[in-house]
Amino acid sequence: MAATPRKNKTGRRILAAGAGLATVGALFAAMPSSAGAAGDAFDAESGYGNGKGWGRMVDVQLLSFNDLHGNLEPPTGSSGRLTRLKEDGTTEVVNGVGGAEYLATHLRQAREGHRYSVTAAAGDMIGASPLLSGLFHDEPTIEALNKLKLDVSSVGNHEFDEGARELSRIQNGGCHPTEGCFEEGKRFKGAKFPYLAANVTNEKSGKPLLDPYFIWERDGVKIGFIGVTLEGTANIVSAEGIKGLKFGDEVETINKYAKVLERKGVKSIVALLHEGGLPASGAYNYDCDAPGAGAGISGPIVDIAKNVTPQVDALVTGHTHQAYACTIPDPSGKPRTVTSAASFGRLYTDTTLTYDRRTKDIVRTAVASANHVVTRDVKPADDISELIKRWNALAAPIANRPVGHIAESIENPSDVYEKPLGNLIADAQLAGLAPADKGGAQLALMNPGGVRAPLTKGTDSVVTYGQAYTVQPFTNMMTVVDLTGAQLVTALQQQVSGANLASPKILQVSKNFAYTLDMTKAGADRIVVDSVRLNGEPIDPSKSYRVAMNEFLTGGGDGFPALAAGTNKLVGASDLDIFIAYLTANSSAAEPLRAPATGRITVVK
């Protein structure tokens, strides 16, 4: 039975989702216009004539961010850092950035003096979240985003982590179907902003799961937002939660709904796209237009941007957790702004869209974008601080439980293929599943995207349950399967070919497994086949090996179909339980755990 559609306080109609993922395809009506300020004289030709940009040309401020992933508290370690490019060409690390309390303050300060300001996001607001949000199925993050006055967001792949039905609850509100309401006397109200998913449709009916577009309007100024997630979402989320859904081509979908908006008289259009690019530098202020428009950026967003209709005036992107504010030529060769604000609330993007009241379109030559650091030298927003305090009190009995000890921070850097924390997790999985009665694993493989945060040492050596949860928030079940040596090698080759050709996904491996990755070569040839070793011995293509990995990889996730070919599967404990058990068994206050050495993967550059 389909859920009953509801109206929120702003009168927007929200999605309805039902059993079998039957969905409505109704489109959002435009938000009500705001009346002019008292005493302002308005005419259609010149607008408000008080010298503040309310004439024919109106500057609309677009504030945007992406990939928050439920990081309400300030992220720690490498997750709370950025790299800045200095004037002399060298780089420096900017520590202590991010946190919803500070993001709120920065956004509120940025809006000051701007009559026309809209805030948008490009997906992954929730999912893979730290314990403070993840323990409560991300209700705290949605509540915080409501307080931040987010106007609209596209969905990302992580919005589907708990399936489409849970996404419907996140949008519409209501208590969790199995865990109920988390606060006595309070019912979760859902997102006050619309989540858009134009390219996520019901396989049978073809209707969108969520509304495909949203029209923001103030004083006759209209801007349409089209929201899409990456076409490959089905390959990187659990298949069970998205049964019956189809994820369509991003370009085709955006172009389709740009025409719909044009027919409705909306000529100013922004695409919110949960797919991104890879700038040549990791510095947040790197000029990716040097030496020419879009010359310093690669990845999926480049081809997408070059093919999205010129009707779209700007693209706000995400997914790759990178920072950039580029211009990439549209199909007519005209530069168009494409932005991304890294991840975890460490940056926000401020884009000026100059709107022409006469043509009802954006003057593209006047569009300007820049990323701004969410520093912690501002006063934290009281309402967000209170929200964090309230939810922390509920989480404390679980979050503060000690589970191990570390002698130093164990990092998860984004700019290297082999990560110390990835090694630790793979070692934990092998140790937990090597016993004969646990699966008899001979090696373990861990997907890099499943490691969500560093394990940061505090004032003492204690690791809490909350910290461990933040590192591994998915609670995937562990599995052990039979794979031949040939299948193992094929899986290694799939790290750098096929779906992962443009953006390699390098599996983290247990300490008894090693190979060479030759990045001077291309595609599958980057794996030096005769270098692959288990316990120092060459892999035998015809021999069968017991391999431990999480159920996401066992299902072929992240572009690893070879891993889905495993046989004799045995399901074990969750990845989080395995990780915590390893920390507890292998560390103490007297002998805290140190970061594992790297060198399992030899990289040739």
Image: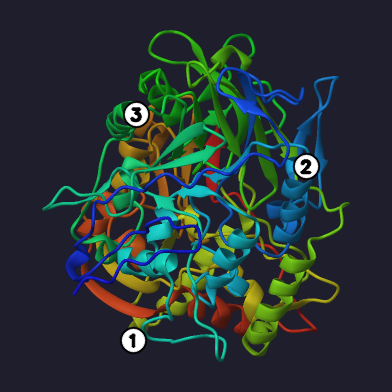
Q: Which residue is mark 3?
A: 258
Q: Earlier in the sequence, mark 3 or mark 2?
A: 2
Q: Amino acid at mark 2?
A: Glu
Name the one closer to the observer, 39 or 377: 39
- Gap between marks 3 and 2 measured at Cα: 31 Å
Q: Earlier in the sequence, mark 3 or mark 1?
A: 3
Q: Amino acid at mark 3?
A: Ala
Q: Is residue 217 left or right of residue 441?
A: right
- Gap between marks 3 and 1 measured at Cα: 57 Å
- Gap between marks 1 and 2 measured at Cα: 63 Å
Q: Which mark is residue 437?
A: 1
Q: Is residue 203 left or right of residue 250?
A: left
Q: Quadrant of residue 49?
A: top right
Image quadrant where one finds the N terminus: bottom left
Label 1 CA crowd tier, 10 Å (few <14, some 14–19, many 20+): few
Is residue 48 among what the camera can see? yes
Q: Earlier in the sequence, mark 1 or mark 2?
A: 2
Q: Amino acid at mark 1?
A: Asp
Label 3 CA crowd tier, 10 Å (few <14, some 14–19, many 20+): many
Q: Which mark is residue 112?
A: 2
Q: Vertically, is 112 above or below 158?
A: above
- Foreground tag (3 vs 1): 3
x 24%, y 72%: residue: 569
